[in-house]
Amino acid sequence: MLASVEIRPIITKAAQDAGFDLAGIASAEDTAELEYFPRWIAAGHAGEMKYMEARDEQGRLKRASLAHVVPWARSVVVCAINYNTAQAYSTETPAEPRGWISRYAWGAQDYHDAVMRRLRKVEAAIKDAWRSADLRTSCYVDTGPIVERVVARYAGIGWIGKNTCIINQKLGSWLFLGVILTSLDLTSEFAALPAPDRCGACTRCIDACPTDALIAPYQLDANKCISYLTIEKRGEIAEELRAGMGRHVFGCDICQDVCPWNRKAPVNRAEEFQPRDGLVNPTLEWLADLSAEEFRRAFRGSPLRRARRSGLRRNAIIAMGNSGDRQFLPLLQKLSVDEDEVVREAAAWAIEAIG
């Protein structure tokens, strides 16, 4: 059995071989950043994302402390992969009457699967090196009782920016994170320093947010966030937030598009991160009038399924209303009598918005 200090270079190499750009190790102990999480939940800033409020048998928020939920965890291996592609940013493309889908959702494969496949290879390397029946591990990609960006900071992956995203000095913020909880104490011999905050006095992300979701540096109110509104929010969207959504139909990249650290972000050529046909600047007519079968066929294996057909159509219709383009009126008239109540309401609003 290797000493834990000897496993660190094995983990680094395994992560590189698996296709990750960065890898680091953090302690599983609670950090000061997690003290903010219960207050964020209590303030209602998680919106309708009830999974963020998951609690243990004692009523404690799971994401507020790994020690409460996974008491056997001693270290967290954090792996990051750049998903940036060669296409222009949303802030660089013409404001034409088309939709915008967040960069991370363009790929031919759901990023959860793409990252988890790589993460399993790193986990296998750890098990092969340690070779002990007492070793315990658990892998997560956005699904575990853990605030990934916090452990990513302490693993040296990057700092938490004012837009609440992890930012790396060389790679920028277009990063998918995967974590491996392990019962090994991999930080006792060497404790990595948290990545220093390099946002400085910059407030471009805060200034650029159309819905003022960044209520203060490092603080996000999901209720106003375009990503939340277009993906997680079910039913009708508050009318006062619709204009700020612009042409966004799934997610939003604005706070990352304007970040100076993304000016020279490298491009990942991995096939699974390259855009599917039609997902960069998609036509609003196509999305708004999707049949159930077209939705299943077009977005099989895609993150866009999370918005559901009703939500995606609603978002496209709101984008039509925001465009002010009268070419959409015939379709909107048709959708104003759709069988979906949410679609009908959005269409009526869009017709009035266009005038």
Image: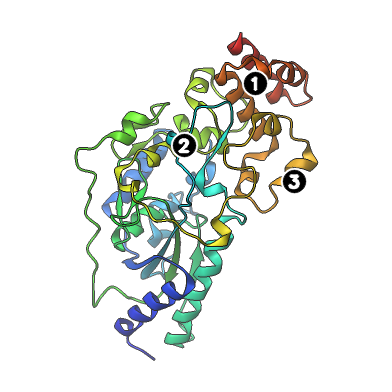
Q: Which residue is mark 1?
A: 346
Quarter containing the N terminus: bottom left
Total numbered labels: 3
Residue 20: quadrant of the picture: bottom left
Q: Which residue is mark 3?
A: 296
The Cα–Cα distance between marks 1 and 2, rounded to whole angstroms, is 24 Å
Q: Secondary structure at mark 3?
A: helix
Which quadrant would residue 101 be assigned to in this image? top right
Q: Which mark is residue 90?
A: 2
Q: Is residue 255 above or below residue 68?
A: above
Mark 2 lies on a secondary structure that is helix
Q: Position of residue 96 (x, y in %)?
A: 54, 27
Q: Please state which amino acid type lies under the numbered disc 2.
A: Ser
The residue at the point 29 percent across, 60 percent down is: 154
Q: Residues within 10 Å of mark 3 (few under 14, many from 20)?
A: some
CA distance separating discs 1 and 3: 22 Å
Residue at the limit of the structure toward the top, as seen here: 355
Q: Quadrant of the C terminus?
A: top right
Q: Considering depth in this image, is 206 or 257 the residue closer to the camera?
A: 257
Q: Which comes before the other along the chain, label 2 or label 3? A: 2
Give left or right: position of 273 versus 257: right
Question: Can you tell which of label 2 and label 3 is closer to the viewer?
Answer: 2
Residue located 63% across and 29% down the image: 316
Place of residue 248 in the rendered image (x, y in percent of width and height, measured from the top left) = 53, 32
**Residue sitting farthest toward the bottom:** 1
Residue kind at label 1, given as amino acid type: Ala
Q: Earlier in the sequence, mark 1 or mark 2?
A: 2
Q: Residue at x 62, y 36 (%)?
A: 282
Residue kind at label 3, given as amino acid type = Arg
